[in-house]
Amino acid sequence: MLQPPYTAYERLYTYHLDLPELPEIEDPDLIGVWLEDESAILFFHRPKERLIAELCRRTGAGLIYQADLAYDEWEAGREIAPFTVAGLSVAPVWAAQEAEIKLDPSVIFGSGFHPSTRLCLEMLLKYLAAPESKITSALDLGCGTGLLGIAAARRGVAQVVGIDHNPLACKVAQANCRRNGVAKRVTIRQGDLRQGCPDTGGFDLVIANLYQGLMAELFAREAFWQARFHILAGFITPMEEKLLAAVPGSRVRFLERNSRDRWCVWVLANRVRGF
């Protein structure tokens, strides 16, 4: 996340270590740490070879790789700039112009600059605006920066829960919720969806912007399909056939499909609870 004196991201210095747990790191240039299975990825604003060497010496960790890249390279070359969807304006925190949502994207996915998240946002706003949807609660699986949950709260959803496996994503999402004044309506939780899916029956809407393998696992769990509506994304066109075969057609029906740059989004309704 951005901490003083930094107000924007320019270059990222990343270090991937084979270490499942890290001691607390106090460094003014630290952006954050990803913990993934048996490894950790550290992100800094400036080079930290000496710090990393000392950390490896003290912990016995090994350096798997390191990289120095421009911030827009991390975002797959996409411009990190203000945009508007269905009247909802979103801007990075360093942008001068005003926006309804100001976001610190950090190094977390789900910032709205990638087609997958943008498609989810478009569908979310479309169905929230439909009076017949009557969506008052939402569950965001793989919440990333918290953008979709913040947008839902901004558009009147009373209860939003976001879940992400990445502890840094949870910290970034919580900070973004506070920044945008929705922390009382959006709850962020850290959790591994591979270990189990929460019962979605208490929610009107489930948003899941996840990778194909995890999506297929969730499709096989009855608890995943209890909500009234689902917005599903995170997969490209060639993946659709396999995922489609896993959708329980007796339980849900398709309302809409859209795509951009090969990335797809589906909207489904529960045959009993939807409209």
Image: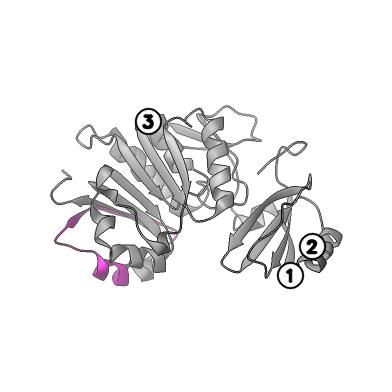
Please give the residue where the numbered disc 1 appears in the rendered image: 61
Q: Is residue 211 left or right of residue 126?
A: right
- Mark 1 near mark 2, Cβ–Cβ under 8 Å? yes
User: Which residue occupies 53% across, 53% down?
Assistant: 109
The magenta-colored residue range is: 241-264
Q: Which of 196 and 49 is in front in this view?
A: 196
* Residue type for callout 2: Leu
Image quarter hosting the C terminus: top left
Q: How far apart are marks 1 and 3 (CA)?
A: 46 Å
Among the 4 quarters of the image, the one containing residue 68: bottom right
Could you tell me if residue 86 is visible in this image?
A: no
Rendering coords of residue 39 (x, y %): 63, 67
Indicate the quadrant containing the N terminus: top left, top right, bottom left or bottom right: top right
The amino acid type found where label 3 is placed reads Arg
Q: In this view, does 130 lie above or below 52?
A: above
Q: In which quarter of the view is residue 136 placed?
A: top left
Q: In this view, does 270 lie to the left or right of 258?
A: left
Question: Residue at left 25%, top 55%?
Answer: 225
Give the residue at mark 2. 55
What residue would you read off at disc 3?
A: 155
Mark 1 vs mark 3: in front: 1
Density class for disc 1 (Cα within 10 Å; few <14, some 14-19, many ≥20) is many
User: Distance of mark 2 from mark 3, alpha carbons?
Assistant: 45 Å
Q: Which label was assigned to residue 86?
A: none
Q: Is residue 10 above or below residue 99?
A: below
